[in-house]
Amino acid sequence: MGTRTTTITVTDRDEDDAPVTLFCTDTATTGDTGTVPDVATAPPLLLLHGLAGHCGEWEELTARFAARHRVVAFDARGGGASTRRPVDVSRAAHVRDVTEVVRAFGLAAAGGPVLVGQSMGGVTALLTAAAHPELVRALVLIEAGPDGPSPSLPETIGAWLDSWPVPFPDAWAAAAFFGGGAAGRAWAAGLAPGPDGLYPRVDRDVMVATVQENAERDYWDAWDEVRCPVLVVRAGKGMLKQREADRMAGRHGTTRIAVVPEAGHDVHLDDPAAVYGEMAAFLAEVAGRGR
């Protein structure tokens, strides 16, 4: 798999705000076989990570899909190797970033990419599909849905970040703190070296501000505007509840619900093989259905 990295610059709606730089990864135009993927049957995938995450957490799924699909991911504004303290962290700004990445990488050709989002990245994917149906061929929501409002969310996120024992002495200690296993290692990989150990690449106030809209509203109105096929992946030990998933399917006729019973909220890290299997089956259906 030949993955390249690059950055793009996004100008926010208020031109007085400093431009935002987004760090992106791209498997480019060829898979492991050296052939060019046929976007008509294997559309590009654009992967959006969750709050305080980073695009590197998609490496396992990217490796599984890269032989057939072009796979693009990026660090969301506010963390990772992207601009750490953007002025605007609204949902609209995150949607704007997705549309700029689609444009910059030419992903709108042949019906557009499949947007794949986990947790807060899934909310961004949902809102993008609702606002820009012409850009999105299909939607995969991993542990993400339109329910809300969640008034306690900013306080919960702030307390979670406050609990991190910064600096972490090393990657092993960080992985253990984040629960161990593949998920723990992926979270540890998102840290940056600094004095005396490893530090977050996000700031508490930025992350709290990022979830503020979710504290105040739901997104069912946007969900009703989604027109493309949707796969919802729910973890049996995660945060997306069956009631919400069932309501999503009831209001959107081309929604497929998949459950990974023994996985947690980071199901793409806990059981990437299961997520890959569900996504591959869904993508085959999307290709068969056409645009």
Image: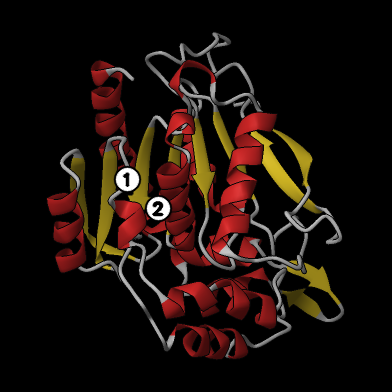
- Which quadrant holds the N terminus? top right
Q: Residue at x 71, y 77 (%)?
A: 203
Q: Are marks 1 and 2 in contact (CB under 8 Å)?
A: yes
- Which quadrant holds the C terminus? top left
For this view, does 163 lie left or right of residue 152? right
Residue 185 point in image, percent of width and height: 55, 63
| 161 in relation to 249, above or below | below
Residue 40 point in image, percent of width and height: 41, 13
Q: Residues within 10 Å of mark 2 (few under 14, many from 20)?
A: many
- Say which amino acid is labelled 2: His
- Say which amino acid is labelled 1: Val
Residue 140 point in image, percent of width and height: 35, 44
> Quadrant of the rendered structure where residue 137 is?
top left
For this view, does 119 lie left or right of residue 92? left
Residue 233 point in image, percent of width and height: 28, 52
Determine whether the residue tagged by mark 1 lies in a helix, strand or loop: helix
Residue located beneath label 2 in the image? 268
Q: For this rendering, which residue is in front, 152 or 164?
A: 152
| 253 in relation to 41, above or below | below
Can see residue 3?
no
Q: For this rendering, which residue is in front, 206 or 31?
A: 206
